[in-house]
Image: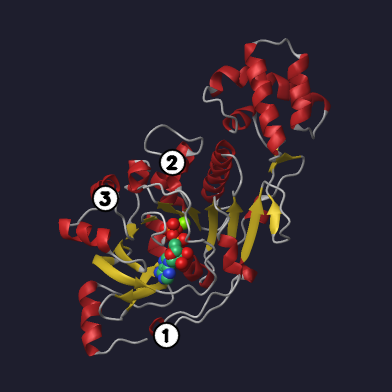
Amino acid sequence: MSAGPAGKLVQSVLGLRNNTKVGGYIGLLHGHDLPVTLDINELLQKHVCILAKTGGGKSYMSGDIIEEMMKRDVTTMIIDPHGEYGAMRDMGKVGEPRFGVVPRGYADRIREFSVLKSEDPNIRPLRFTLKALEARELLELTRTNDVRSYLTTLKKAIDALREHQEIYSLRDLIDVLLSLETDNKSAVLINELEYLDEIGIFATLGNKVSELVEKGKTTIINLKGVPPDIQELIVRRLSTIMFEMRKQDAVPPMMMVIEEAHNYCPQVGTALSSKALSTIASEGRKFGLGLTVISQRPAKIDKNVLSQCGTQIILKVTNPNDVKAISASVEGLTAGMMDEVQTMPIGMAMVIGAGIQTPLLVDIRPRESRHGGTGVKVISDD
Ligand SMILES: Nc1ncnc2c1ncn2[C@@H]1O[C@H](COP(=O)(O)OP(=O)(O)O)[C@@H](O)[C@H]1O
Ligand SMILES: [Mg+2]
């Protein structure tokens, strides 16, 4: 797709660059059929949000961007609470010819993990190594918010255990706590550790970071069916590890995609993962760790996280509180544009940022790979 002379003018006026090396193709400029590309470097460095009502096409759109990142060997980790991104292994349907998209699957790029047992041979177990965790880190994986008051007890138990054995299980740790003098604190601790033990997210040998993240590959963390608090702690652990590893340059620069972000970094209250995600939102860019937050409830995402997103992709939004939250977090949106957002059809997006100077209306390109979302929502959250 190349633009004619009139198209070239529109392109240059809007600041649309067509650099296929860094520019990920997401669709056609509405009314002009000019390709719109987003600068992948900029997405990684300045974070992205994708906002729309349920069924508005957020996951579909994010799949487009992930395809573009896969093509350019950008390392990505997707937090996938509905287990829908694994479908990207498969080839998608043929779309409208004007987009010029050739269907393909990405099986060779994708690795998928789950903490739950899966019949699917493509899904590998996600396990953290217990012995690698200090008392504080282990406490951060529990539902206790008051880390300090349990620290001494847990440290004592871990030290006692480490004196005798290098490798130990949660069960061993619980047994030591049971053998120590029992008070209220150790009872709470034991309860929390029992809960973690039941989920089975720890193993003597957990996944190595090099197994979870490989340069140029997309890692899907499939959280389907996992209890919400365990989801949060997995997101916290992975976000923390990725941030620390990026600081040391021990993993490649990468993008973390967070679906249903309002659950992991809410505006009201906190999730176990809140702090880790807000750290990435505010400091990730310094270390080459990009964040894509996706949500159907912009009003419910931590404003500090949302306001750090340099690129906003807005699809149809109708809830008045969400419309307000978007206008508050995105600079340069006029009342007219906000009206537009409420009436846009599925398949159209308003894109702001990523090296584009004015908000653009984009006809979103068809997916190359299969979209896993069902499109049928039993419960609406609007
Ligand atoms: N750009 C698009 N082109 C064609 N169909 C789309 C597009 N975006 C969304 N859809 C359809 O709408 C349904 C819901 O999209 P999805 O991305 O799953 O919504 P959500 O915003 O809830 O993540 C999809 O299953 C797909 O059928
Ligand atoms: Mg979705």
The answer to whether mark 2 and mark 3 are in CB contact below 8 A is no
- The residue lying at 52 percent from left, 22 percent from top is 146
Residue beneath disc 2: 265
Between discs 2 and 3, the one toward the N terminus = 2
Label 2 SS: loop
Across the whole image, how many numbered discs are drawn on residues?
3
Task: Confirm whether residue 232 shows in the render.
Answer: yes
Residue 8 relative to residue 76: left or right:
left
Ligand 2 closer than 8 Å to label 2 CB: no
Outermost residue toward the left in this view: 335
> Distance from label 1 to label 2 (Cα)?
39 Å
Nearer to us in this view, 281 or 346: 346
Place of residue 41 in the rendered image (x, y in percent of width and height, measured from the top left):
41, 64
Q: Label 3 is placed on what type of residue?
A: Val
Q: Earlier in the sequence, mark 1 or mark 3?
A: 1
Q: Circle 1 sits on which residue? A: 97
> How much space separates mark 2 and mark 3, taking CA atoms?
19 Å
Above or below residue 283? Residue 372 is below
Residue 23, x across and y down, in percent: 40, 72
Residue 269, image quadrant: top left
Which quadrant: the N terminus?
Answer: bottom left
**Residue lying at the far front of the rendered structure:** 378
Q: Amino acid at mark 2?
A: Cys
